[in-house]
Amino acid sequence: MNLEPTGERMILEHYDSSIEDYVIYAMHIATYNFAEKFTKDKRVLDYGCGSGYGSARISRNAIHVDAVDVAEDAIAYAQEHYAAYNIAFHCCAPDSRLPFPDQSFDTVLSFQVFEHIQKTAHYLLEIRRVLKPGGQLILVTPDRSTRLLPWQAPWNRWHIREYSTSSLKKSLEPIFQEVDILHMSGRKDVIEIELSRCAKIKWITLPFTLPFVPRFLRMKLLNVIHALKKKRQPAGVKKQFNFDDTDITITQNAQPSLNLVAVVRK
């Protein structure tokens, strides 16, 4: 089956059609590479697995990976393309109870999901419930400081809210014992591609991402822009680029920061 590239799912056959897409791909791969030291020989929950490519990467050194997503088509795609003896794919609504017993996992991964969650306390409490004592959550979410004006609502039509370092800590610290926030950055010319993309969208969408614009109206207008952009895009042509995931770094206080990377212990 084919899976629609909504911009929120990493589908490998689409990643090299533009330099902007390839930067995002490199960021995703760097994130999973960073996570490997927390998943090696562990039982892992990939909470928001999308197309399943990341779950497959993690399964190469994990004991077992349970991968969960809200979208039935994403789970069907993942099962078709990434089935393996040590991966199980599950469809589960974000505000429901996870289908796992207490203390089931050594590590939980939540990559580019938290910004989509309305009931954040429920989401985090479910993660805490299924983590073993001392288990770790690796949570990655966009850094609003480089994407939005201080008072601006998200221009990404699927994002409910985006986080700064302080607001992410404020969400995590009441629920988990140890919270360490790292930042994703990288080679200057590579990072500038993503910064430029975000700046352009930030200003184009400003009239309807003002804080007083109702979310339903913001979504409607952003959908129109997305449809027009999709109509104008030429058919994807695979290209070669002079950078890869090794040019993306995740460290303490790296700037400019594209993503926040929270390393959290139960």
Image: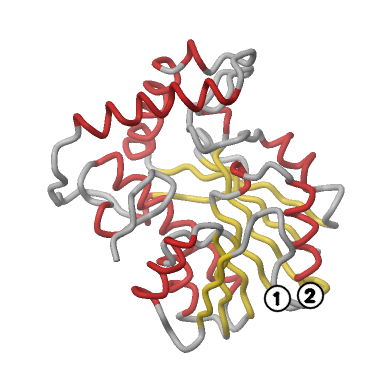
Identify the residue at image location x=38%, y=35%.
Answer: 194
Q: Image quadrant of residue 134?
A: bottom right
- Residue that extends furthest to the top in the rendered view of this protein: 207
Q: CA distance from mark 1 to mark 2?
A: 6 Å
Identify the residue at image location x=48%, y=32%.
Answer: 156
Quarter of the image with the C terminus is bottom right
Kind of residue at badge 2: Lys
Q: Secondary structure at mark 1?
A: strand
Residue 77, percent from left and from top: 38, 67
Which residue is under mark 2?
132
**Label 1, residues with CA under 10 Å away: few <14, some 14-19, many ≥20:** many
Q: Secondary structure at mark 2?
A: strand
Classify residue 126 as left or right of residue 162.
Answer: right
Q: Which of the two labelled residues, at mark 1 and mark 2, occupies the earlier sequence position? A: 1
The disc placed on residue 105 is 1
Residue 193, percent from left and from top: 33, 34
Quarter of the image with the N terminus is bottom left
